[in-house]
Image (cartoon, grey):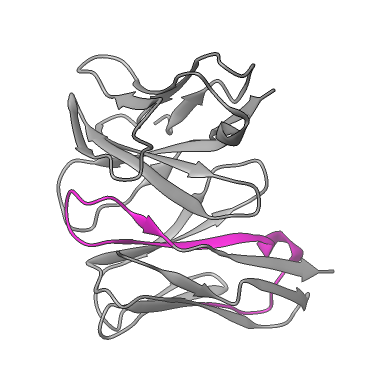
Amino acid sequence: TQLLEQSPQFLSIQEGENLTVYCNSSSVFSSLQWYRQEPGEGPVLLVTVVTGGEVKKLKRLTFQFGDARKDSSLHITAAQPGDTGLYLCAGAHNYGQNFVFGPGTRLSVLP
Amino acid sequence: NAGVMQNPRHLVRRRGQEARLRCSPMKGHSHVYWYRQLPEEGLKFMVYLQKENIIDESGMPKERFSAEFPKEGPSILRIQQVVRGDSAAYFCASSPLGGENTEAFFGQGTRLTVV
């Protein structure tokens, strides 16, 4: 079974704080995606990482793929209330395989 | 470039009726994935299809559920004789053909309520 774990499950912080959420697996993935989902909406793709050790930055968001391509982290600098949502990671093993999702980290940024 | 389109957005069915959920993938995408999400939970994989083929249906219940992706037209997720436990949000995603760096793009989902 290809399992993705995410931690923490819930996170509530004040506006302006920094945070890191994690996505871990015992499996190696050829690529890993991060999504954000708001209530009543579908997940929105934030980034895809494919190379072990890869770091991608998207404004205040920094994504890292572990060297062994089994884990990933998402760091948010100076969080804003608009960052509130469910952050999901999803892994693909290779072309033609379905995407496996983690259970998500539910982030709440308080003004 | 239109995104993944799902309809209806909301669907109410009585127990025992059939539910048909439609998904039109992004232009140029020939891979479709269906996921189910219960409130406060993550996405559970159901089925993965390419045009006219089911590639992986390991997440789909053996009874009452079926999916298709015909050569022409949208992908359909069909639930027969719905029960209250089928109430959930059903999301469809599509991805383009080819490449290891496959990315999936999601629709806004269909929220099924069984009464």
Residue B11 placement (x, y as % from top left): 61, 21
Q: Residue at x 50, y 50 (%)?
A: A44
Image label count: 0
Specify whether residue A77 is painted magenta. yes
Residue A8 placement (x, y as % from top left): 60, 77
Name which quarter of the figure residue A51 lies in.
bottom left
B57 or B105: nearer the eye? B57
Q: Is residue B11 left or right of residue B48?
A: right
Q: Residue at x 68, y 47 (%)?
A: A39
Specify whether residue B32 is painted magenta. no
| Position above or below: B90 against B72 | below
Quadrant (top left, top right, bottom left, bottom right) of the N terminus of chain A: bottom left
B2 or B104: nearer the eye? B104
**From this viewpoint, which residue is outermost toward the right?**
A111
Name which quarter of the figure residue B69 lies in.
top left
Residue B81 placement (x, y as % from top left): 50, 18
- Magenta segment boundaries in residue numbering: A74-101
* Residue B38 in sight from this viewpoint: yes
Name which quarter of the figure residue A12 lies in.
bottom right
Q: Is residue A25 left or right of residue B54?
A: right
Quadrant (top left, top right, bottom left, bottom right) of the C terminus of chain A: bottom right
* Residue A64 in sight from this viewpoint: no
A65 or A28: nearer the eye? A28
| Position above or below: B61 against B69 | below
Q: Is residue B37 left or right of residue B96?
A: right
Residue A80 placement (x, y as % from top left): 72, 68
Q: Residue at x 52, y 49 (%)?
A: A43
| Position above or below: B80 against A38 | above
A88 or B79: nearer the eye? B79
| Position above or below: A92 against A21 | above
